[in-house]
Amino acid sequence: MNKIAIYLRLSQEDYEKADESTSIVNQRDYIKSYIENERSLKSCEIEEYVDDGYSATNTNRPSFLRLIEDIKSGKVGTIIVKDMSRFSRDYILLGDYLSNILPFLKIRFIAINDNYDSLKEQGNGLDTDTQFKTLYYDLFSKELSEKVRSSIKQIKSQGKNINWAAPFGYIKDPKDKHNIIIDEKTAFIVKEAFDLLLKGYSCIQVANIFNEKGYITRSERKEELKLSDYSKNFITGSEVKKRVWTNAAISQITNNELYTGDYVYNKFKETKIGGRKRILLPEKEWRILPNTHEAIVSREVFDEVKKIKAKRSFGDYTGNRNRSIFSDKIFCKECGRSMCFRCDSRQKKNVEKEYKYRNYYCHFCKDCRTPNNIKERSIIELIKPKLKEFKAQITVEKEMNLDYKNEKEDILNEIAILNSKLQIIYEKYKLTNISKEDYLKEKTIIQDKKTMLRNRLTEFEVNIVDSKNEMDITLIDEEELLKAYVRSSLKKIIASRSGEIEIVEIL
């Protein structure tokens, strides 16, 4: 039986339009009505794939990814969407699926509003009108993203706070969502943090003082305001039993210029339109609007604390002194938080050799008097058996990579030749030198060859290490091999109080 996948998507922008015609319910009813009136689809089994609140430019949509997996495994024979923009607004991605991937897998694709049914398309490809339409969706999405970014910049230039939550010490003004007002329950904590740093205390000492006093933490206050739920740790899934202040939290608070009453924007820049990655701009490019809201500390106090913290920074030394190859990858099973690294040195009398004691401990569990400590040596001993297999794998991959480089170049040359042929036959068709039937027939043959070549490239890229990550196994020592394993294969380590260690590898 031909199983039908109906794909439904709604973005955040669609919500803001308040247009019932784009709703998930409407899309579902619209598609099911179409199926009922289409004789070839009436008796087919239907499965829904719904992405609610996701942009069409985002390729990591959960249901979209599940649909692709079901396509690959042969569970789906037909895909139906309200229009092509529901499936994707990326011109290249959409074009590749409609022209190559879906026809190759014998998948029927229907976009109702676009009057597109791949079964009725000669050659199962894309006609010229459809190609222009997919290009329009792609350009429209990028234009919309640029407009949103410009609009946000304009709002920020007016001193309006558009963050989803106010910083600790403030709350959103109930009368104006773009304004923040003093939170009487927490503002004094922020002020005290600045005062203690002025008196010479470090961030970790301030955190310890706040924990002893039992001050409410940032996550606890957000839960009180029903803004977030921090009951479980997303890395380990462990239940968060206690919230505590950390030196990182104190450092972040005392770095935030909003507490001076000034609004700072243009600190970051997106790496590309529609992207989520951002880079920090130089401080001279920042924009500051003074006195946009009530201050918790004065500008003089903020600048003085900034100088004090800068004097305590020792560059790379501070960053490397308490780090090891497992830093940022080891987590406490009991509370789910990241574990700290500690290295102590001891030297026996009349012996030149220095003995180093390297271990990890959970700062949070330590404060609760339920310490969780693990020796680095224990982790290494557990990983050692995996290094032999890892080394053999790299050796094989390196040998394959030598052949791959040559074959990849040959395949890319063949694809380039096929692209030229496509251009030539299209020009012949436009000049009426060949019929539409002959053009579509030749086009299908060429595209099938391109798909086969691309599949070969994909197989190589999945199974072979990129040439940039190559290493000479004959020269590498055990320590370097361990670092290479941690860098490329280790996802995280979860350590429990009972001494159990779980190694989670990158799939």
Image: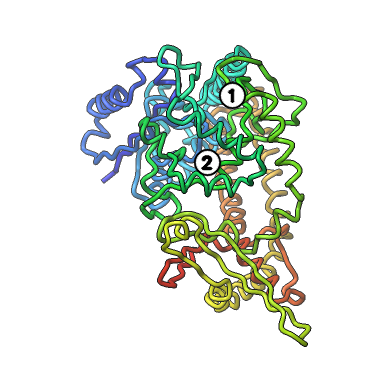
Given residues 199 and 281, the one toward you in this image is 199
Q: Residue at x 71, y 30 (%)?
A: 303
Q: Say whether residue 507 is visible.
A: no
Contact check, label 1 and label 2, Cβ < 8 Å = no
Q: Could you classify mark 2 by the number of other residues whose Cα lies within 10 Å: few (under 14), some (14-19), or many (20 or more)?
A: many
Q: Earlier in the sequence, mark 1 or mark 2?
A: 2
Q: Say whether residue 218 is visible.
A: yes
Identify the residue position indicated by label 2 in the image.
100
Extreme residue toward the front, this view: 199
Q: Residue at x 52, y 63 (%)?
A: 361
Name the mark nearer the viewer: 1 or 2.
Answer: 1
Q: Could you classify mark 1 by the number of other residues whose Cα lies within 10 Å: few (under 14), some (14-19), or many (20 or more)?
A: some
Q: Dot 2 lies on which element? A: helix
Identify the residue position indicated by label 1 in the image.
142
Given residues 310 and 193, the one toward you in this image is 193
Q: Amino acid at mark 1?
A: Lys
Q: How is the image coloured?
A: rainbow
The image shows residue 443, relative to residue 384, as above or below, that is above
**Residue 22: % across, % down:** 36, 20
| Distance from the alpha carbon under mark 1 to that under mark 2 | 24 Å
Q: Residue at x 70, y 25 (%)?
A: 300
Given residues 182 and 235, the one toward you in this image is 182
